[in-house]
Image: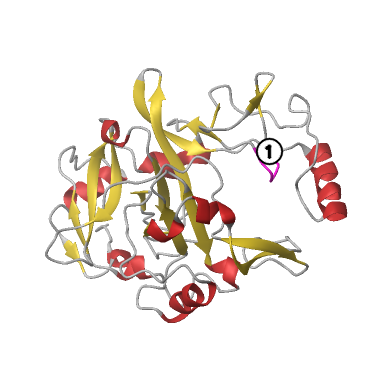
Amino acid sequence: MRSLGSVQHKIPCVFLTEVKEEPSRKRDCQQFQVVATETLNPVALEADIHGAVATEKIDGTCCYVTLYNGRPHLWARLDRKPNKQAEKRFKKHQHQHRSCRGFSWDVEEDFKIVPEAWIPALRVQHLNGHPVPDEHGHIPGWVPVQKDNKQYCWHGSVLDPEGGAVLVLRPGGDEDEEELEVSAVPLADQMERTLELIGTNVNGNPYGLGSKKQPLHLLVSHGSFGVRNPPPVDFHQISSWLREGPGGRVEGIVWHCSDGTLIKVHRHHLGLRWPDGGASLGERPVVVRVVGGENTDRKDLFSSFCRLNGQRFSRLQDVHFDS
C-alpha cells in the first residue's frame, strides 16, 4: 500500500472521549484516564470516516523527511513543552475546569527552549509570529537527526552512513500477503512523508525486534499497512475486533479520509491492554532486500542487513545477525 496521510499533529479519536479519575493504562504517573464514549466524533463524520482507508496504527516514535541544509533529511519528533511554572498553571486549570480549553498561554515565556534547528510541525497555528500550542499544551515540531546527538542514536541507526537512504519495513511480495520486506529506500523518495521508528529501544518494543546486545530499528511509512476486512466504525464492533478479530492484535486503527483528515482509535481508548499476547506485525514472515554498501569492517545496522540480503525469516522478531 502506498503511503497515505502525513502525521503532523495529534490525531483525534474516532469517538468522543471523556476523562475518568483513575490511573492511566498508557502513561505512568498519570492519575486520569481518557476513554472513548460510544458517540462518533463529529470530526470523523464530517471527513466521511465510513469511506476512509483503515490502516494499522504502528507503535513507535514519529519521524519526518524534509529538507535540511538543502538536502533530504530525517527529522525526529520533538514537541515544545511548557516549563515547570506554566505546566503547574495549566494542570490547575485542567483540574478546575476538567478541560484543557480556555487556558491562556504566553508563548514567549511559558515554553522550554528547543534546539536552534527545531521547526514547528505543518499546520501549527501562529499568533504574532509565534507557534500556538495545541489543546494539550504542546507545540508539535521536528528536530534534524544528527550523528553526534546520542538522544537520537536509534533514529541514526536506520540511516545509511554512506548515502541518503533509510531502512524501511513495508509490505512484501504479491505471492504472500502476510510477508514483509526490509528495504533500503532513498530519503528523496520519502520527502514530506512521516514514518514511525520501531524497534528494540522504542516504546517497550511491542514487536519484539532485536535484543540488548544487537538492537534493531526500522522505519514504517504511515499508512503502509492496511487493515484487511476492517470492522465497521462502531464502538462495540471495533472493540470486539480488537479483542478477538484475526487482525486485531494491533495498537489501534488509523483511518485516512479522502480529504486528508486522519482519525484514530487506540486500544487504551477502549480499555484494552497493549501489547496483549504479542503484536501481529512481529509475527509476520519477512524477507530482507538490502543491497549495496556492504563493508565487512563496519558494524552498523545497514551493513548487517546487507549481509542478510535475500534471506527470509518466518517471523520479523526472528531477524538476527551473526556475531
- As rendered, which of 300 and 262 lies closer to the eye? 262
Quarter placement of the C terminus: bottom left
- At x 36% / y 18%, what residue is drawn? 70
Secondary structure type for disc 1: loop
- Residue 294: image x %, image y %? 18, 41
> From what the image shows, is residue 131 above or below residue 17?
above
- Residue 163: image x %, image y %? 25, 30
Q: Specify start and end residues of the magenta stretch as a single range.
A: 134-138
- As rendered, which of 127 and 302 lies closer to the eye? 127
Camera sees residue 146 = yes
Task: Identify residue for label 1.
Answer: 81
Q: Is residue 260 left or right of residue 122?
A: left
- As rendered, which of 316 and 262 lies closer to the eye? 262
> From what the image shows, is residue 146 above or below residue 287?
above
Q: Is residue 153 left or right of residue 36?
A: left
Count of marks overlaid on the render = 1
- Kind of residue at disc 1: Lys
Q: Is residue 280 left or right of residue 148?
A: left
In which quarter of the view is residue 112 placed?
A: top right
Q: Main secondary structure of the magenta part?
A: loop
